[in-house]
Image (tube, rainbow, N blue to C red):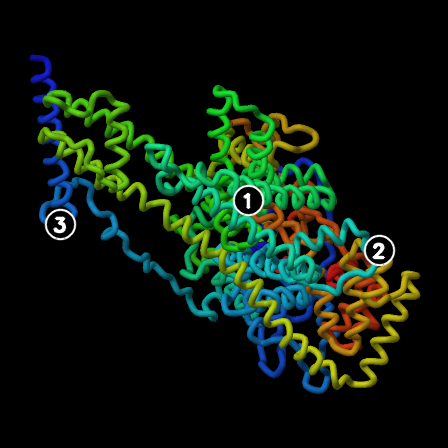
Amino acid sequence: MAAGVAAWLPFARAAAIGWMPVASTPMPIPPQEKTKGKDGLIILNVSGTKFQTWRTTLERYPDTLLGSTERDFFFHEETNEYFFDRDPDIFRHILNFFRTGKLHYPRQECIAAYDEELAFFGIIPEIIGDCCYEEYKDRRRENAERLQDDEEMDMSNDAPPVNLTYREFLWRAFENPHTSTLALVFYYVTGFFIAISVMANVVETVPCGVLPNRSKEMSCGDRYALAFFCLDTACVMIFTVEYLLRLIAAPSRYKFMKSVMSVIDVVAIMPYYIGLVMTDNDQVSGAFVTLRVFRVFRIFKFSRHSAGLRILGYTLKSCASELGFLLFSLTMAIIIFATVMFYAEKGSTASKFTSIPAAFWYTIVTMTTLGYGDMVPKTIVGKVFGSICSLSGVLVIALPVPVIVSNFSRIYHQSQRAEKRRAQRASKEAGRALVAKAPSPPFESQHNHLLHCLEKTTNHEFVDEQTFQANCMEISVMNKSGSRASSLSSSPHGLSSCCSRRHRKKSSFSLPSTNNQELSTIQIRERPVVNSRSSLNAKLDETVPLKCDKPYITPSMVSLSAPVVTSSDGHGSTTTTAYSQSNIVRVSAL
Amino acid sequence: MSVRWETEGLQTVGIVCLVIMFLKLMHLLGLIDITETDNSDSDLELSTVRHQPEGLDQLQAQTKFTRKELQSLYRGFKNECPSGLVDEETFKTIYSQFFPQGDATTYAHFLFNAFDIDRNGSIRFEDFVIGLSVLLRGSVTEKLNWAFNLYDINKDGYITKEEMLAIMKSIYDMMGRYTYPCVRDEAPSEHKMDKNRDGVVTIEEFIETCQKDENIMNSMQLFENVI
């Protein structure tokens, strides 16, 4: 609506004549219109594809590249057109934004490429129209998650730092068994003992045959009590040692003790110790038997070994609301149907439906389509309602299940992706190396000189990865990308990764609220909820400051545009108009 | 005995339920139709009202704009209203966007009536352009005429006190609540215009008063270079 509204501005100003006769004070002087050129056609040549539009169309948004004098930098005298060395397919959408005032996001484009183009032409992504906004945000979030996974994987798969303390080394060994063979051995040993312990618990209860001096059948546990006791002791010994080691190695002991896995560990080994401590008192031994049930929790220790179990647990946690809804609706239905069945069956003789709670069992069994048959309605009415109950049961249970399934699928695929990416890393590295092989010499030397200037400016130095990680554990993004930049100095990819990380780390940038042109201060009333999407030049509410500070302005300019631009833009404003100054700040704050 | 009543009652309930479900099933299958609500989907017809403006030459004769200006104006107009007509609601929406902090709908309503010369409920491009021509390129008298026409809400040739108050209120409404100093009720300025104190202002009184006022004369020239 913004473009259309802009078109009506002259009308609104003219209509202001209607206020004149009743005005109480003299009017202010109208702002000086800078001499507008005649409204001519502008030719925009984007990588060979020619676009044409009216000059006034572009000037509707004076704080973008195309709408301000910044486009003069791209003017090509020989052909009398503006030349941009960018993607013409995405440019089409950008130009449509100027024409219609609505920015759309094409689904087939890569989100990162699209973001780059938007940033180049000085358009905030927040003004994407309602039709495409959700899709855009979803894709962006997905991409961010993917990159974050990537980074986490990088950080975990890097060459092990040399000077870790033993405690940290131990913790790493526990968390990531692939780091050393000792850790791997420990991992398999504990797994083996968990399995043994669980199987022993199971076999203990199997009837083992009759002893000569006893009449009834004994379970294996009673018959070979000593053997089982020794096995149990061995397992618990191993588990205890493991738990204590983890406790010692944990970076934050309090946090470790609160975590789910440690609780499971404790619950798994406690019954044994309680059994040791307690005497053979008859009263407490009853409780002790109950405690033995908790030994089955040892099976949950397998979740450290199996990613699938973890995913299942995570899925259930994330579907808590759907499960809650399922439970609630089932409860409601059970109560209703149990009441109805009770009153329906009250008349029949020898009815099993002695009370409403007794009817609960029938309702549950029927709704889940189990149908044990221990309670059956005998009256006709009872049978009618019983059939309605079973039909509705199927429906109620089938409703939340797809949601849970889709959640599980999404999380599962996410974890699969991590595996896939690990496999792809090798080929990716090879590809990068290939591109980096043939740099153009002047580009490389200029780039190096630039980085050197940057070092001098900030009085820091770029270091390579090993020495940096040796110096400090906290790996900040900026330094890392700086070091990457130096190692991949010849390839533009290094810079684009720098920019992409910056894109990822920040969410938005605060715009200076600027100039006095009326257009820029128009707020679009349709979306009062989210201020940041309304006016182009208003301050955004989410003023997250840039994670990367000033020094990284110049590298980004090099990668995006011709070196010619760098010299004029990077060194402050040579023009004097207010908004082009702010434009420079904005564009370079990539 | 009571047990028998209960089972009887439940049987009735059961039978009633069965019958209702059966009817619903029939309705679903389309065999019988028991709903009274009419399907409003069939009423939906695409509004194919469209208007093409007169030719460029005629408009050039009727207004004081140059050809290029008319072209530029039409492009903006058509961009916003592809059908060629602006109805009152759209007009109010557009105008309100220039005054976000206040309520511009009342004044927009008056403006709409001032532009809609033939009172058919929608502004065509010709109305739009003729109105603008008066406002931007007309003589002072023509502009004052236009302003009089705006204030005269019922278009009877006289501005009454109520009409003046309504206009003033609508202008102050556009300011919104958050103004400094706070908006108070203004004494109507009709007094200075109503020379013969008959309670209404005629066009001659209006023009005469305005021509005597320096401020008004100056401000009339203010927006000449808008286009």
Observer-side mark, 3 or 2, equals 2
- Whether residues under marks 3 and 1 lie with C-beta atoms below 8 angstroms apart, the answer is no
- Left or right of B44, for residue B221: right
Checking the image for residue A90, the label placed there is none
Q: Which callout, 2 or 1, points at the residue further toward the start of the chain? A: 1
Q: Residue furthest front?
A: A212
Above-or-below relation of A409 to B17:
below
- For disc 1, the marked residue is A231
- Residue A1 in sight from this viewpoint: no
- Whether residues under marks 3 and 2 lie with C-beta atoms below 8 angstroms apart, the answer is no
The residue positioned 49% from the left and 40% from the top of the image is A296
- For disc 3, the marked residue is B30
Spatial distance from mark 2 to mark 1, Cα to Cα? 46 Å
Checking the image for residue A472, the label placed there is 2
- Residue A155 in sight from this viewpoint: yes
Spatial distance from mark 3 to mark 1, Cα to Cα? 71 Å
| Residue A241 placement (x, y as % from top left) | 67, 44
Observer-side mark, 2 or 1, equals 1
Mark 2, secondary structure of its residue:
loop
Label 2 in the same subunit as label 1:
yes
- Left or right of A363, for residue A9: right
Q: Which quadrant: the C terminus of chain A?
A: bottom right
| Residue A61 placement (x, y as % from top left) | 64, 61
Q: Name the residue type under label 1.
A: Leu
| Residue B33 placement (x, y as % from top left) | 12, 44
Badge 3: few (under 14), some or many (20 or more) residues near its Cα, within 10 Å?
few
Q: Quadrant of residue A180?
A: bottom right
- Whether residues under marks 2 and 1 lie with C-beta atoms below 8 angstroms apart, the answer is no
Above-or-below relation of A386 to B68:
above
